[in-house]
Amino acid sequence: MKYPKIPICLLAAAMSASTLAVADDDDELEFEEAFLYFELNDTDGDLGLHGKVDGDGWKKVKIEGPNDRKILDLKVKSGLKRQGMTELFFESSEPTFDELDPEVFFDRFPAGLYEWEGKTLDGKEIEGEVFLSQRIPAAPVVASVGNGAPPVIDEDGELGCWGKPSGTDVTIDWDAVTKTHASLGSDTGAPLVDDMNMPPLVDNGVIYYEFVAEVDETDYKMTAVVPPGTTAWTVPAAFIAVATGAGSEEVKFEIVVRVETGEYTEEDDGETETIDSRPGNQSAVESCFLLVEEEDEGEDEGED
């Protein structure tokens, strides 16, 4: 059998293209972290989109969502381009629900697969994939603050601070989060495990709670990230003494719950791709407790 003669230049070009194609596949890198998630502040009534990426030094990064919609495109310039970036964290603006209805917010960021794509300093492709869910966990509900009086609701429906606890340490208890938010996301009010397309996990898919206490108008802050089985944390006497020494009449605190995204499977052109569960959406509640006894308004009026 006679074989057709292929010009050497064409054969070399074909081999080179094949080699490059293989090299491109081999050169694809994964970001060490690639997150995209929603955060609800249940106290203020607002939603925001948060993102974080971390990995080898890069000079370009973008995020593409469902239907190849690009929502972020970042290129570094000049000296920073030569130095490269490794870690990036961002938060969107968070207008209140009066300014931006949650339905409009969710329309801007549909649930589905989002891809972080970048280019390293030496020109290699680097990527990461994450499933963005619109299911928002219910915010933690504070059950008690030491043995202080519960907060009073004012005429506008706003909660005040919890009353001054007795004792030196103040333990704050909250109810375990087991369901989605009552009025946000899809299939609201369902158990988290069932509602988030998740495999059976302990503690309803909650990854952790974060407790933050701070002294207003200062840099003084304490933070603890605790496992899902922990639903109480103590503000020690030493921190309360710091707040008192700074002239503060209250200590503010925040409790955040973080849940899994759930495993996500997508089919494209007959191929099935599974994205592992990752840290996903979170909800927060804010409150405070007094360091001084609340004045009795009735007594004040009597003195007048």
Image (cartoon, grey):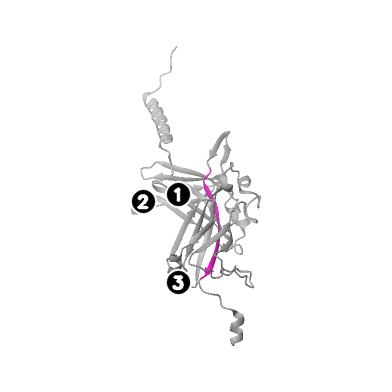
Prevailing secondary structure class for the magenta stretch in the rendered image: strand
> Residue visible at 43% across and 35% down?
25
- Percent coordinates x, y for residue 28 in the rendering: 43, 38
Q: Is residue 148 left or right of residue 86?
A: right
> Residue visible at 40% across and 37% down?
27
* Three-letter residue code for mark 1: Val
- Element under label 1? strand
Q: Which residue is mark 2?
A: 81
Q: Quadrant of residue 265?
A: top right
> Residue visible at 48% across and 64% down?
169
**Mark nearer the N terminus (3 vs 2):** 2
**Mark nearer the N terminus (1 vs 2):** 1
Q: Which residue is mark 3?
A: 244
Q: Which residue is mark 1?
A: 53
- Element under label 2? helix
Q: Which residues are magenta?
A: 277-290
Q: How many marks?
A: 3
Camera-side mark, 1 or 3? 3
- Element under label 3? helix
Q: Is residue 78 left or right of residue 206?
A: left
